[in-house]
Amino acid sequence: MSTGAQKKTYFDKRKEARGKVSSGLTHECGVFGAISSSASEPGNFEVAQLILVGLEALQHRGQESGGIVTSEGSNHFHIQKGMGLVRNIFNGDNIKNLVGHLGIGHTRYSTSAASESVNCQPFVVHSMHGSLAVAHNGELVNCASLRKKVLDRGVGLSTHSDSELISQALCLIPPEGEVDGPDWPARIKHLMHLAPLSYSAVIMLKDRIYAVRDPYGNRPLCLGKFVTFDESTGKDVDDGWIVSSESCAFLNPMQYMREILPGEIVEMSREGVKSISVVARPENKSLAFCIFEYVYFARPNSVFEGQEVYTVRLRCGEQLAIEHPVEADVVGSVPESGNAAAHGFSRQSKIPFGELLTKNTYVGRTFIQPSNRLRQLNVALKFSPISTNVMGKRVILIDDSIVRGNTIGQIIKLLRKAGAKEVHIRVASPPLRYPCYMGINIPTKKELIANSLDCKELAKEVGADSLQYLSVDGLVTAVQRDIKDKGNDLGHCTACLTGVYPGGVPEDLDW
Amino acid sequence: MSTGAQKKTYFDKRKEARGKVSSGLTHECGVFGAISSSASEPGNFEVAQLILVGLEALQHRGQESGGIVTSEGSNHFHIQKGMGLVRNIFNGDNIKNLVGHLGIGHTRYSTSAASESVNCQPFVVHSMHGSLAVAHNGELVNCASLRKKVLDRGVGLSTHSDSELISQALCLIPPEGEVDGPDWPARIKHLMHLAPLSYSAVIMLKDRIYAVRDPYGNRPLCLGKFVTFDESTGKDVDDGWIVSSESCAFLNPMQYMREILPGEIVEMSREGVKSISVVARPENKSLAFCIFEYVYFARPNSVFEGQEVYTVRLRCGEQLAIEHPVEADVVGSVPESGNAAAHGFSRQSKIPFGELLTKNTYVGRTFIQPSNRLRQLNVALKFSPISTNVMGKRVILIDDSIVRGNTIGQIIKLLRKAGAKEVHIRVASPPLRYPCYMGINIPTKKELIANSLDCKELAKEVGADSLQYLSVDGLVTAVQRDIKDKGNDLGHCTACLTGVYPGGVPEDLDW
Amino acid sequence: MSTGAQKKTYFDKRKEARGKVSSGLTHECGVFGAISSSASEPGNFEVAQLILVGLEALQHRGQESGGIVTSEGSNHFHIQKGMGLVRNIFNGDNIKNLVGHLGIGHTRYSTSAASESVNCQPFVVHSMHGSLAVAHNGELVNCASLRKKVLDRGVGLSTHSDSELISQALCLIPPEGEVDGPDWPARIKHLMHLAPLSYSAVIMLKDRIYAVRDPYGNRPLCLGKFVTFDESTGKDVDDGWIVSSESCAFLNPMQYMREILPGEIVEMSREGVKSISVVARPENKSLAFCIFEYVYFARPNSVFEGQEVYTVRLRCGEQLAIEHPVEADVVGSVPESGNAAAHGFSRQSKIPFGELLTKNTYVGRTFIQPSNRLRQLNVALKFSPISTNVMGKRVILIDDSIVRGNTIGQIIKLLRKAGAKEVHIRVASPPLRYPCYMGINIPTKKELIANSLDCKELAKEVGADSLQYLSVDGLVTAVQRDIKDKGNDLGHCTACLTGVYPGGVPEDLDW
Amino acid sequence: MSTGAQKKTYFDKRKEARGKVSSGLTHECGVFGAISSSASEPGNFEVAQLILVGLEALQHRGQESGGIVTSEGSNHFHIQKGMGLVRNIFNGDNIKNLVGHLGIGHTRYSTSAASESVNCQPFVVHSMHGSLAVAHNGELVNCASLRKKVLDRGVGLSTHSDSELISQALCLIPPEGEVDGPDWPARIKHLMHLAPLSYSAVIMLKDRIYAVRDPYGNRPLCLGKFVTFDESTGKDVDDGWIVSSESCAFLNPMQYMREILPGEIVEMSREGVKSISVVARPENKSLAFCIFEYVYFARPNSVFEGQEVYTVRLRCGEQLAIEHPVEADVVGSVPESGNAAAHGFSRQSKIPFGELLTKNTYVGRTFIQPSNRLRQLNVALKFSPISTNVMGKRVILIDDSIVRGNTIGQIIKLLRKAGAKEVHIRVASPPLRYPCYMGINIPTKKELIANSLDCKELAKEVGADSLQYLSVDGLVTAVQRDIKDKGNDLGHCTACLTGVYPGGVPEDLDW
């Protein structure tokens, strides 16, 4: 069993180069693509607007930067990328330049490194077989060897981003034994063999979009359509195709169809949607959909594997109540991420749910260098106890996860100050112990509190009367119990909890 | 009974001059003041930091502009004001200029009128008796006559703001029969007689702060202290005094003490806090604390009249369940403002509470000029139904108020699309019918949907199976039931619901 | 003879409050006003555009902030003010809001004090006799006593600016023995008696503009008109009136008419231009037009007292050649301010003129904290020697003035490095020795190099072979020689050169 | 003789893609490089500061964007690039990140295309043989075929910039018959054979900089050193090497050494400077240094081919006086570009020089949409006539070039309005008739006024009494007369005047 790299790999160095690491868990991307099947008149930018809506709905998957690339069917792509939130990058003026009937978009996690604007996706290159735009969510576990392959061919790479690497590799490396022609599906398939983990990608050519999910199914990707009401026939007709990291982005008039299968390449064009191929996983390897998408990252109304994320979180709360019951007067959550699990805990335990904390949505990153007197005000500004539900009560507080343990201790103090008689912490996920190499930004092993303190010690550290995590088995059960029609092909990546990495740990590169 | 002005008053014109009117209900201000009783060394800006924390906690009361004024005890005040959110106005650099051991701050509601930066509060003037800074929440109902009084004395007024008017009136008009000296409490008292409605104000001199609440008690204002641990005695000692529009701003190490009484003038100085005077209301007039602070504006953890706002909202929900019961499978709310009432409704009706909608906190003011196909995406981007709790269910949706009715109709559509069998709307406040002249920005009578459609019509309009409001009596009961020790002096302003204005409607001014 | 205040006056304190003092000489303002006599349709903002052009042409008189106020004939003025250069304050959008057929504008010198935006002019107040906007250039020498007068009437002043003081004084203080009515000319006249020095002001009411120059004529102000070609008659017709600090702002189709006389009040309205009054100076006082407008501040193409500034500067150069001749091969200037004097020196001395330095217009305020190696690069970046005219030559370098002596020494080094055999400095103005209290920002006496080093010492200090100033008599001769039709009433303020202040030094105020 | 392409080439399309074309002549770049030979301690960013100074001094060669790349000797380069002026891109904070003892910088001409920030130079790639940064001035005449070569190797190009193309070509294409190793000079030499025209480039590796000038010598590039005073020996010692587009950037303590020869590759490292190779021109091709660098682009104090640019411009003025004499009272220039030629004309003709116009340096790009009344104010705001030298005089106005003829006509009107009796235009360069494909942005043939009007017609069009250009022969004589020691190898590109392109016109690419 591999339990994480000890020495610095190319992968680690790349992380460092990226600048400051976020203090909590952060996603690394959301992707979105759309193609309209009806003819667009020149100057039409409705598809760009649709992508913009999609990116706003995926904003929780990354707030550092965003971008949209569109085409009217020619190799002259229209591009708008920038740092910051989607609503700050795009405006009523620049959106109008993004004309065309197909396009892809991307949103990425947050750092403040302004000079990194060169890393914004989608990444666009001009190749001998036409223009190409690539956006992806995930990280290439074997980026080092793929990078070496590309460099050895005499290509210079101007960034450390996987998107550039994927783009150049697609242009550069035709499948062995095949002619160096414009057979993009063959090139994509070949690349998927070279780099089977981990990505969900949208790849745009002048007249089509390929939606690609890695053979392990590590990152989510799903398919939808949009629908127009045809007045002549009185019926809804399919009028285009969309692809998104999460189904929460399919707002009316968009409709969810299905997930892209692990290893599948789907081609979207004006002619419709077709599944081109399903690339197999390396032998003896299991499916490995990221279980933390259920626990933490995804929006509660997104659907994975046929079930709504909210339902899974409810079940995690129920399971938690079974595994670690405690007598109390009220159960509540750290809003809003712990809400579903708290309701599940309440349902299972029959202890009434009550709002314990109210969240101040106006509070941003605060700059105060607090004096002694003003210490720990940031948490207090963000979360305020509601006395009605706390005063004189034994309280169970559900959190979705504990990363460093900084916040929970201060919240407990606030609850006690507001009159809580007892405070019991129940965490709706297992302890987080290992780094992720597949698209999630997790603090170092040393920083993960679960690696230094057990439940009892942590309870003492944060000032709780008790503290318990959901078990790994409990989580897996909550996730897999109701998944139907999967046969033997059912599997989730729990690497950050167990240290078992589906595709091994990344290779090194002396560079 | 006066039911609102028909012709344009000075008041109306002033509203127009202010530029675009917000689409919903908006507050007009929050105030905060602090004085440290321990000696501060030169360069100390801890009091400014404390005020900054207070303003962040009061940010829900106004997002247009903010300001802080401090003093080290001299007439040379330090001022920082600006447009936008508190966290955008102040930064690690400019906060350091706000040295001193006392100060006041202000935050104001949102318009985009950049040229209005001159209207930012606190308003500072130099007078023959020293410098003076004024910040207030509320509106002077008789601003027109007071303005005329000031102009007639030969003073030019450079803005339409009440703060300037209050400042100049304080400087200009000594109490009749008294010498024109620096007796500021007498001047304040005199002004309160001239203009008894509506304001909560903080008035800073070089070495003291006066906290003032209008005789009707229309706007909230409360008193606190901050406490330091004295290592030599091992005890907490009072180390300063604070005043705030709402108690939610009293974060640790600040502590809530009591409300400022209607008509009360409290003086805060290094010597301590003392109640200077309580100015009486005009004869035959009742107390008139704004009931919409409970319903809509205040943070749920704020305390008014001895009760937590959250408790009152819970009771409104219970009362609503009594007044308008309906059979259903689940009761939920439009997050987050309707949460408390939904829990109250659930508790009373025994119908289980369930989260019906999840809110996308990343979505800001979106600029999209939607095509037909993309209509109504804004609401969908903001609120997404949670199928787990909606699909196949009869749903009761609690909202805290309905102003124009635009949003609720689109939410109902989303719920139906997500599979709700029935959707019943219950509004945890009575229909809003009249404008406010006391510090709340309410759309025009014509725009208020309750003035054009009754419950049945509105239910049909928005697509609900039923729609009911809480009664005015029900609301008043929910608010007043548990208020103790008020004797006969208990009263709330319900002007926006009943058209009965505690101080009459504003006068006109031909200007 | 009074030679400048020794102890800190209110005036000094006000200067300090203004924040960082510029390193050289800086002006404090330019004013501009315009009224169109033809009827404007609603929405017309041509007058604002005209003012904008005027302010751009007066930008050399102040780069800190600017503002324009217009009116369509009512008391509702349109205002746009801001920090920075005119072209950054106004844009194609906000200029459109400045509708109306009359308006005034202002531009002010540079500090970085962002919080001072409240001090931007024009200053607008609403008075009992209508709205009033005031913009001025200059400083009230007796601001302290006037301020006390206003404060004693019970008025609070919110800034330290003379514009607010002038505005409130105009509203507040009717001429003694007169009724407190809307007779603005009488009020202005009265104020001019109370405060005879120093200002050129434009005062706008809803339908007219008063152009006012102080009785000493210390600051410049001139009158113009604009002209439209009438197609029906084939003739130019006067179509409006304009007033400006300098005639350089009268661009086509504006035409220069005459100077406003010292003490004159000119009323501009749709009915035309008329001279209302000429207020007399205090007895025994001489005219005192700032001689440094000729030497340094004004644009070379501006006209004062019937002569173009460029001509006066040429004559200063001629006079300098007479007073301090020297043998040399080439005479040139520090571009561009010394150009005219250098040409004059060349003409008189018969030594050929040659460009010695080229100026890099792209270089801005540079932020480099230079290491030892990079010291003094700022001057080198700004001015580069032209070898063609310098190498192997004896060079005379004309500068318009020497304030601190920092720059000239570095320029001399550059010239020597470029091969100059000798470098002789000739300064086209007398040594600057005293502060100004009338609108010019001059460094302190201690900082003025002429107060610590005589010509020989300074030559040594800066590395010149010789260094000589123009004499005060020489300057006065150059300025006054060709002024015609002035009779006995001819006088210039030379306070900064001689310490003789036309109106005495400012009074103190204990505040 | 080839006289410019008729159909749209890849080159043309690339120009279009670049967005709005400037209205006058614009340069396309300046480059600068520096290496310090003394050991730098970690964190030292003096070299970056030196480059910054160099870029500020080269700012006239491009105002669109800028960038600096440094290295401490490893392949991890430090990069800062951005849109706008150098002083807006770099600040006291970000300059500190640019540590290292060697670096290169770039500045580029102005467009407003924000999305083009990806095109900022220097361009950095990681190759199998280490990191590489490239910045250049010029344009590859055969970019189309080189681009095809690169694309055919399977490389995707993400921009249309020559810098990316040069970078990838350097990585990709080893000299024929040689191994694919890290012999960068061989790669550079090979590229120079493939693409002999037109560029001056700086190419940085982790420990050295190559300065490269194309074999035609079309773009300028010169070498310098910087010098430190060694206190122990009391002597100046060479302490590093610098390279710059123009010598005007060599400010103290930098010193000019010599020009890089046409075709030369110079290697700068800590070991010193050495000339690696001089690549020959294609047979029968002449040297082709851009003659417009003398006429228009370069700073007057820059040195090319052993002569100061100012001297050449003086001689152009003298030559012009010989070719096209005219009786007049005064000769002057459009400041500041025509100054030198005007002095030359004056010297030759004995007609006195006089300043005719003063330039308003504060006027920026103005946004006014002028009404009829305000037409042509932009030119009037920028240039004002000086009556002293114009009124009643016969005036000769020297301009350095006429591109579209818009400005000169308005200036003539201003002069006549100011009283000029006659206005004779003399242009110190021949008529501009052809586009440039070698790094200069020239309007289209149709827009060039010289292609539609001859001298007489143009004089009439602009309202001049006469108008004459310098002849091509006259210009070439003025430039070449005093160049010594060049033997037969003397040649200048006059393509924009004669249509004779030294390397032919660009090829087409069907893309």
Image (cartoon, coloured by chain):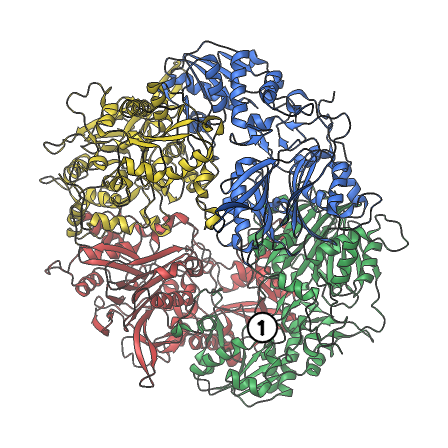
Chain colours: A green, B red, C yellow, D blue
Position of C302 relative to B471 (above/below): above
Q: Nearer the viewer, residue A426 or C292?
A: C292
* Quadrant placement of the N terminus of chain A: bottom right
* Label 1: element kind: loop
Q: Nearer the viewer, residue A351 or D362?
A: D362
Instruction: Answer left or right for B365 relative to A199.
Output: left
Position of B221 relative to A416 (above/below): above
* Quadrant placement of the C terminus of chain A: bottom right
Report the amino acid beneath label 1: Ser
Q: Which residue is mark 1?
A: A337
Question: Is residue A229 visible to the viewer in this orientation of the structure?
Answer: yes
Give the letter of the chain under mark 1. A
Q: Count the numbered circles shown.
A: 1
Position of B118 relative to C332 (above/below): below
Instruction: Answer left or right for D275 relative to C418.
Output: right
Q: Nearer the viewer, residue D233 or C50?
A: D233
In the rendered image, residue B115, in percent from the top left (x then y), is placed at 39, 47
Q: Residue at x 42, y 42 (%)?
A: C89
In the rendered image, residue C42, in percent from the top left (x then y), is placed at 40, 34
In the rendered image, residue C162, in percent from the top left (x then y), is placed at 24, 44
Residue extending farthest bottom = A327
Residue extending farthest front = D233
How crowded is the residue under tag 1: few (<14 C-alpha within 10 Å), some, or many (20+)? Answer: some
Q: Nearer the viewer, residue B494 or B111?
A: B111
* Residue B165 location, quadrant: bottom left
Question: Is residue D371 visible to the viewer in this orientation of the structure?
Answer: no
In the rendered image, residue D375, in percent from the top left (x then y), is placed at 45, 26
Residue extending farthest top = D327
Instruction: Answer left or right for B166 relative to B82.
Output: left
